[in-house]
Structures are given as C-alpha cells and as structure tokens.
Image (cartoon, rainbow, N blue to C red):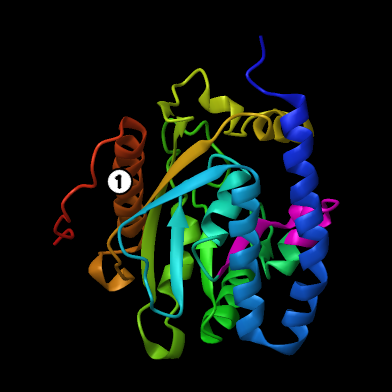
C-alpha cells in the first residue's frame, strides 16, 4: 500500500500552483519597483507554500543579520529551496540550465537567482557576478556539494565554490554561515533511510513523479540548524574554510536526523 495519497497530493499541488500564479505578478513588479519588496515577497510566498504542503520547519541557532552573508548548506531536495527561502532574504546560486526549465526556471529568476556554469573553467566570471551582488548587500545561498544527495550524509564540499568567500564587499571580510538541513520526521515519527527518498531527490529520479508522491504524504518536519558565523580570515585558506563548514554541516545533519539537542558552540580552529 502506498504511503502517498493521490487525492491529497492533487489538492496540495493545486493550492501551491494557485499561490504561485497569484504571487508571480507581485514579485515581478517588486523586482522592478522596490528592492526591499523583491527580497520580502519570496519570504512570505515560500512560508505559505510550506504551510500548504504541510512542511514544518524547526529552526536552530541564530541567523546572521549581516548584509551581505554567504550561506552554505547541504542539498538533498528541491524542497530545500522553499525551506531556506522561507527563512532568508537571499538569492540562490544555481546551475545555468535551471534558468531554461519550464515553470521552475521562471521561479528561479523571480527569486533573483545567480546562474552559473559549474563546468566552466572561467571561474572569474562567476566571481564577478557574486561580487556585484555582494557589493549591493545581497546575501547569497550556495550548495557547495555541487549536486543533491540522499539526505543521510553530506557530500564533500567543492572548495572552488568558496572562492566567493574571498570577496571583500566594501573592503570587509565576507560573513560565511554554514547551515544543516535535516529531513527528520514524518507525522512525528523518525524518517529513516527507507522513507527519506520520498522527499530527497537525487540521482536519476524523475522530478514530476517525485513531487507528486511527496505532496501526498503526511506532515514533514525539517530541522534547519544555523552554525557559527565565520570569515575567510579565520582560516589559513579557502580549502580550510570549506572543510570546517563541511564538518559543521555534517555534524548538524547527524544531530538533526537523530533528534539530539543542539550542540554547545565550539571554538573555531586556531
């Protein structure tokens, strides 16, 4: 017997589509008229979407209030986008082919995403895009694994993506904050390895069928932990920063999945 209800899925996705259709014109106007609105509209839009899809987000830790901040998070599903966008007034860094996707490409553009070619050798052109946005005090969200994983562990971070952390907006070291996203419970029961793929999207899974099944399940609880804020100046180089962020995110993910309380703050590496 399937855990997912086609009827519930149809109802929730209909509400999601109607919300999206209603708010697309508002966000398009906000981008043209008012930068503050352009940052705020997605925040409330994604909160409404999560409510419609019965996804509960539990936040741990303190979110950086520094503008700009580079947020780095593990990546396990397209749901990560709504989860983070419901908490942060920030733009995502996405693969450039997403810009051409029907529907989701439009949403990514309205989110003011930064599209890059991760296979390109011209890293400097990507850094220039980041610098321009950071100098405008726009915070950025990066998934340094470079792809989505199974939600049970964290793929090693690509240190090249931390070149952005070397940018100094307005002459100041850029604030970096790691984030752990843990798909923890379904209807209050621990979400084990066998059930987590109902929500995590990776490998060669079909997108549309996966969305339809996920939307027909019960109430999902996701634990999002914000780790200590650092800068590149706290580390020997960007590789060391990448490794430290990976360790923080990995430990936070393990604790979120296990349901353990938040750790006490640790000292940064000397």
Find the magenta span and give its range: 90-107
The answer to if 232 sits in the magenta stretch is no
Residue 213 image point, x, y percent: 70, 28
Q: Is residue 109 above or below residue 266?
A: below
Q: Residue at x 68, y 70 (%)?
A: 112
- Quadrant in the picture for residue 269: bottom left
**Quarter occupied by the C terminus:** bottom left
Please state which of residues 204 and 63 is positioned toward the viewer in this rendering.
Answer: 63
Residue 254 image point, x, y percent: 32, 35
Please state which of residues 47 and 77 is positioned toward the viewer in this rendering.
Answer: 47
Q: Residues within 10 Å of mark 1 (few under 14, many from 20)?
A: some
**Quarter occupied by the N terminus:** top right
- Residue occupied by mark 1: 247
Q: Is residue 27 above or below residue 20?
A: below
Q: Is residue 200 above or below residue 135?
A: above
Q: Is residue 97 visible to us here?
A: no
**Would you say 228 lies left or right of 31 here?**
left
């Amino acid at each position: 017997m399937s855990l997912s209800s086609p009827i519930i899925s149809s109802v929730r996705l209909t509400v999601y589509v109607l919300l999206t259709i209603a708010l697309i014109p508002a966000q398009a106007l906000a981008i043209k008229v008012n930068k503050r609105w352009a940052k705020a509209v997605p925040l409330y839009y994604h909160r409404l979407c999560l409510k419609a899809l019965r996804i509960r987000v539990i936040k741990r830790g303190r979110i950086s209030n520094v503008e700009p901040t580079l947020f780095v998070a593990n990546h396990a599903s397209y749901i990560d986008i709504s989860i983070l966008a419901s908490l942060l007034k920030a733009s995502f860094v996405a693969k450039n082919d997403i810009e051409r996707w029907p529907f989701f490409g439009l949403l990514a553009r309205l989110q003011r995403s930064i599209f890059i070619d991760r296979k390109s050798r011209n890293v400097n052109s990507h850094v220039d895009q980041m610098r321009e946005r950071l100098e405008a005090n726009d915070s950025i969200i990066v998934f340094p694994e470079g792809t989505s994983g199974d939600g049970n562990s964290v793929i090693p971070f690509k240190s090249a993506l931390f070149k952005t952390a070397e940018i100094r907006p307005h002459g100041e070291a850029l604030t970096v904050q790691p984030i752990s996203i843990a798909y923890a419970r379904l209807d209050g029961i621990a979400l084990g390895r066998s059930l987590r793929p109902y929500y995590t999207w990776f490998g060669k899974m079909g997108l549309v069928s996966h969305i339809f099944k996920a939307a027909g399940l019960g109430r999902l609880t996701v634990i999002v932990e914000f780790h200590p804020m650092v800068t590149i100046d706290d580390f020997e180089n960007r590789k060391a920063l990448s490794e430290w962020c990976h360790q923080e995110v990995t430990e936070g993910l393990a604790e979120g999945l296990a349901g353990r309380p938040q750790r006490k703050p640790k000292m940064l590496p000397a």
